[in-house]
Image (spheres, rainbow, N blue to C red):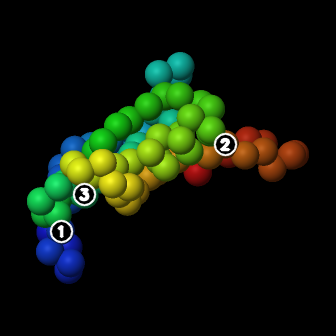
Amino acid sequence: MASASGVSIDQDCITAANALRFSKGPDKIKFILFKITDDEQNVVVEETSSETEYEIFRQKLLSGVDKTGKPAPRYAVYDVDYDLGEDGKRQV
């Protein structure tokens, strides 16, 4: 799927996002990290994880590097749980 920028979104990105949305139980995907390939042509899944510790997610997000070892941007989706009190728990 190509965007207006000319960078394509790999089908695995869509598959991973749907897996995060619909997975349940102890192996539920908690976050997905995406990156732009070194040739700057595609966005691909770098990692999916069921790790629930936010700090681990944060460190992985901040540690993204390119092929030369320089810091490189990452995109992420993180499944947030929150409590609305009497209205119950929700997920985003």
How packed is label 2: few (under 14 Cα within 10 Å), some, or many (20 or more)? Answer: few
Q: Position of residue 50 (x, y in %)?
A: 49, 28
Q: Nearer the viewer, mark 1 or mark 3?
A: 3
Instruction: Identify residue type, mark 3.
Output: Ile
SS at circle 2? strand
Q: Residue furthest right?
A: 86
Towards the viewer: 34 or 21: 34
Residue at image mark 1:
7
Instruction: Identify residue type, mark 2.
Output: Asp
| Left or right, residue 43 beside residue 57 | left
Question: Can residue 22 be seen by looking at this rendering?
Answer: no
Q: Residue at x 62, y 38 (%)?
A: 55
Residue at image mark 2:
81
Whether 34 is drawn above or below 53: the answer is below
Query: Do tag 1 and tag 3 residues touch (Cβ < 8 Å)?
Result: yes
Instruction: Identify residue type, mark 1.
Output: Val
Q: Earlier in the sequence, mark 1 or mark 3?
A: 1
Whether 7 is drawn above or below 19: the answer is below
Q: Residue 25 has which mark?
A: none
What's the CA distance linking mark 1 and mark 3?
8 Å
SS at circle 1? loop
Q: Residue at x 44, y 31 (%)?
A: 49
How packed is label 1: few (under 14 Cα within 10 Å), some, or many (20 or more)? Answer: some
Query: Do tag 1 and tag 2 residues touch (Cβ < 8 Å)?
Result: no
Q: Position of residue 70 (x, y in %)?
A: 33, 54
| Left or right, residue 20 beside residue 40 | right
Looking at the figure, which quarter contains the N terminus? bottom left
Q: Position of residue 39 (x, y in %)?
A: 12, 59
Q: Nearer the viewer, mark 2 or mark 3?
A: 3
Residue at image mark 3:
36
Q: Earlier in the sequence, mark 1 or mark 2?
A: 1
